[in-house]
Amino acid sequence: ANTMRNKRGLICIAMGLALILSAAGLAGYNVVDERHAGENAERAYEQLLAEAVAPGETQLPEFVLPAYQIDPRVEMPEIEIDGHSYIGYISIPSLEIDLPVMSELTMPNMKIAPCRYYGSIYLNNMVIGAHNYVQHFGRLSSVALGDLVRFTDVQGNAFDYTVADLEQLDPGQTRELVLASDYDLTLFTCTVSGMQRFAVRCVRVEDGPV
């Protein structure tokens, strides 16, 4: 009987060690994955700044309105970097965030940078999602009401917003995430547990684009 108990004890110890090693391996993988994500976003952001029109330096004559002001339904212009399409970049000064935004949200794209999940900045209904990597939207929960958020498209048109509300949503609340008619821009990421989404709701500053 003692031999049997000893065997069971050894089996339990071995299983425990295996679980610990597995968890350690997963944690190590996540750290590497997150570092790569940060490097990818920084590299794409620098290239985007180099290729996009700087804010306030529009290439159009002063008397010509930008296409989005004539028809807000126009497609957002894109720039291709390393085979991926970007529509602009997002800045949150209070969090020292400056990140490129890809045109379409997919799992592979989210390992590179934040992505457009829905809508258009011109129609005041855009939703941007990102992983909760520290270098992406991992610090989003630290944002405060009234903080400035700026989105700049690839043609140098900058749109300013203030944070108006903070929400936690269940993964199945897709409709609530997208159809928030009181807000002009939404940023979201997963909570630390991964069980919910943290959403930052923003309203457009009256002065409009730079």
Image: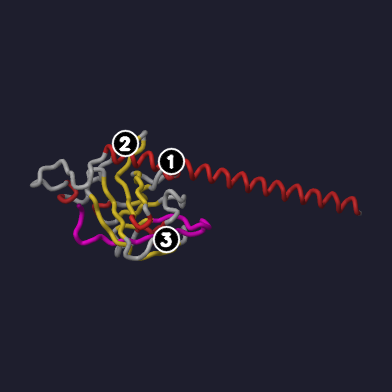
Q: Nearer the viewer, mark 1 or mark 2?
A: 1
Tag 3: residue type?
Answer: Ser
Judging by the rendered image, the residue that carries numbered circle 1 is 39
**The N terminus, quarter of image:** bottom right
Distance in Å between CA atoms under marks 1 and 2:
18 Å
Where residue 156 sits: x, y (%)? 22, 45
- Judge left or right: residue 124 versus residue 58: right
What residue is rendered at 31% in x and 54% in y? 126
- Mark 1 or 2 closer to N-term? 1
Judging by the rendered image, the residue that carries numbered circle 3 is 142
Where residue 105 sits: x, y (%)? 39, 46
Distance in Å between CA atoms under marks 2 and 3:
31 Å
- Judge left or right: residue 207 versus residue 114: left
What residue is rendered at 36% in x and 47% in y? 99
Say what secondary structure mark 1 lies in: helix
Vertical position of residue 59 compared to residue 176: above or below: above
